[in-house]
């Protein structure tokens, strides 16, 4: 398909057909903090392992923009989907509404990092003109393919605002992030909390660490046996939460081979045997908590591995924040505060588009009010 001026936009059915260097130059430009999730290695690992692709309901349809000389100047990680799983921005009600109108909601086009509710860059473009061309090309592709909609999930607020004039509607969500206020150590963080919350966290950590040893492994220190144990934990959690876990062992093998430096694995041992693990990825400005699991039920170990160990590591690395994934109001009492997330949605069906716009007009202030109300319960000391 043609873009603006001499710009040409094509659809890449597999990321393997896109040059790694060209993609990564756009996904992680030198002047921006490193985002591991939009890197070629991460997205390609999803495809190569079969987690994304045939039979998964995530069919790669990445858009690639090139200028007249052939240089790659923009890209949009895009997937044709026949379901709404693995997205964490829930549109099932929209699909049901269109179904009741005897119209098809699927396929739809999803600009996202599959199975990863982490805010970050979505349209990877050299400049605003290329960004607009890619966003418009996604709409054109949806029309040609008979897709109902285009969704850019966990995008930046600024991108969503820029997509508004093209017909994309902005939706606001909520997560819980921990923010580093210049702490030198975990005790500095505790000192910022109210006395009762500080005591509670100390008690939780003491209980979690009773008879337990926690190992922090990064990069090449993570052995295949460690990955095997982690995957066992991941499968246990996935089976309980989702019924069918999204990722397979091959994906984590590729992750460990190609992105070792970004991977941090916490493994808890009791009586000399591993009992729980949690995987984090290190970005340029955040530590991202991704998956956790356990084979023994130890009180408060989940909080220790997923939240407190992550906070300690972020402080050591000087990272501004920890993002611990979707949902979980229990994070609030442990220093993770409400943070808005954003997504952009273009809908072809005029009636559904109008209904969703009205719905978002009511939902957005409700989400903002909820965030403000929740923030009042944050564990930090009150000024004055």
Image (cartoon, grey):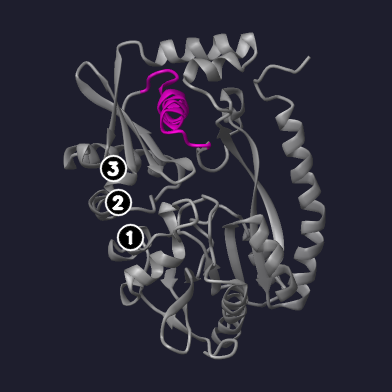
Q: Which residue is the extreme one toward the front? A: 31
Element at badge 3? helix
Quadrant in which the C terminus is drawn: top right
Please give the label number shown on residue 259: 2
In the picture of the structure, the residue carrying the numbered disc 1 is 41
Element at badge 1? helix
In the picture of the structure, the residue carrying the numbered disc 3 is 231
Magenta: main secondary structure: helix
In front here: 40 or 248? 40
What x and y, as percent, mark residue 381? 68, 16
- Quick one: label 1, few (<14), some, or many (20+) residues within 10 Å? many
Can residue 40 be seen here? yes
Q: Earlier in the sequence, mark 1 or mark 3?
A: 1
What x and y, as percent, mark residue 354? 80, 70
Q: Is residue 220 above or below residue 119?
A: above
In front here: 96 or 256? 256
Please indicate whether residue 99 sits to the left or right of residue 138 in the image.
Answer: right
What x and y, as percent, mark residue 115? 45, 54
Please indicate whether residue 217 sits to the left or right of residue 54 in the image.
Answer: left
Q: Earlier in the sequence, mark 2 or mark 3?
A: 3
Element at badge 2? loop
State how far apart marks 2 and 3 are (Cα): 17 Å
Can residue 62 be seen here? no
In front here: 339 or 246? 339
**Residue at the image point whose x is 22% and y is 52% from the top:** 257
Q: Are marks 2 and 3 in contact (CB under 8 Å)?
A: no
Q: Nearest to the eye among marks 2 and 3: give it.
A: 2
Residues rendered magenta in the picture? 297-320
Q: Nearest to the eye among marks 1 and 3: give it.
A: 1
């Amino acid at each position: 398909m043609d873009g603006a001026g001499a710009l040409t936009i094509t659809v890449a059915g597999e990321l393997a057909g896109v040059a790694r260097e060209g993609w990564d130059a756009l996904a992680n430009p030198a002047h921006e903090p490193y985002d591991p999730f939009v890197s070629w290695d991460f997205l390609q690992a999803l495809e190569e392992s079969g987690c994304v692709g045939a039979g998964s309901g995530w069919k790669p349809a990445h858009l690639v923009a090139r200028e007249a000389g052939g240089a790659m100047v923009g890209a949009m990680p895009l997937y044709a989907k026949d379901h709404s799983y693995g997205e964490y921005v829930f549109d099932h009600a929209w699909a049901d509404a269109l179904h009741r109108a005897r119209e098809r909601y699927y396929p739809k086009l999803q600009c996202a990092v599959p199975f990863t509710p982490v805010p970050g860059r979505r349209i990877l473009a050299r400049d605003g003109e290329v960004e607009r061309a890619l966003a418009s090309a996604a709409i054109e592709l949806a029309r040609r393919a008979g897709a109902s909609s285009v969704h850019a999930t966990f995008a930046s607020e600024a991108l969503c605002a820029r997509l508004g004039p093209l017909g994309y509607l902005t939706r606001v969500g909520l997560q819980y992030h921990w923010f580093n206020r210049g702490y030198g150590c975990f005790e500095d963080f505790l000192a910022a909390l109210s006395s009762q919350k500080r005591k509670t966290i100390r008690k939780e950590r003491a209980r979690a660490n009773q008879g337990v040893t926690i190992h922090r492994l990064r990069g090449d220190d993570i052995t295949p046996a460690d990955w095997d144990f982690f995957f066992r934990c991941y499968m246990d959690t996935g089976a309980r939460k989702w019924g069918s876990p999204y990722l397979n062992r091959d994906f984590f093998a590729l992750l460990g081979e190609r992105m070792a430096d970004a991977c941090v694995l916490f493994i808890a041992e009791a009586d000399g045997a591993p009992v729980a693990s949690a995987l984090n990825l290190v970005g340029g400005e955040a530590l991202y908590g991704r998956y956790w699991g356990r084979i023994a039920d130890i009180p408060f170990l989940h909080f220790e591995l997923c939240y407190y160990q992550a906070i300690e590591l972020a402080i050591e690395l000087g990272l501004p924040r920890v993002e611990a994934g979707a949902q979980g109001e229990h994070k609030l009492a442990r220093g993770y505060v409400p943070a808005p997330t954003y997504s952009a949605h273009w809908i072809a069906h005029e009636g559904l588009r109008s209904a969703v716009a009205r719905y978002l007009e009511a939902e957005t202030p409700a989400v903002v009010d909820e965030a403000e109300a929740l923030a009042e319960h944050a564990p930090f000391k009150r000024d004055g």
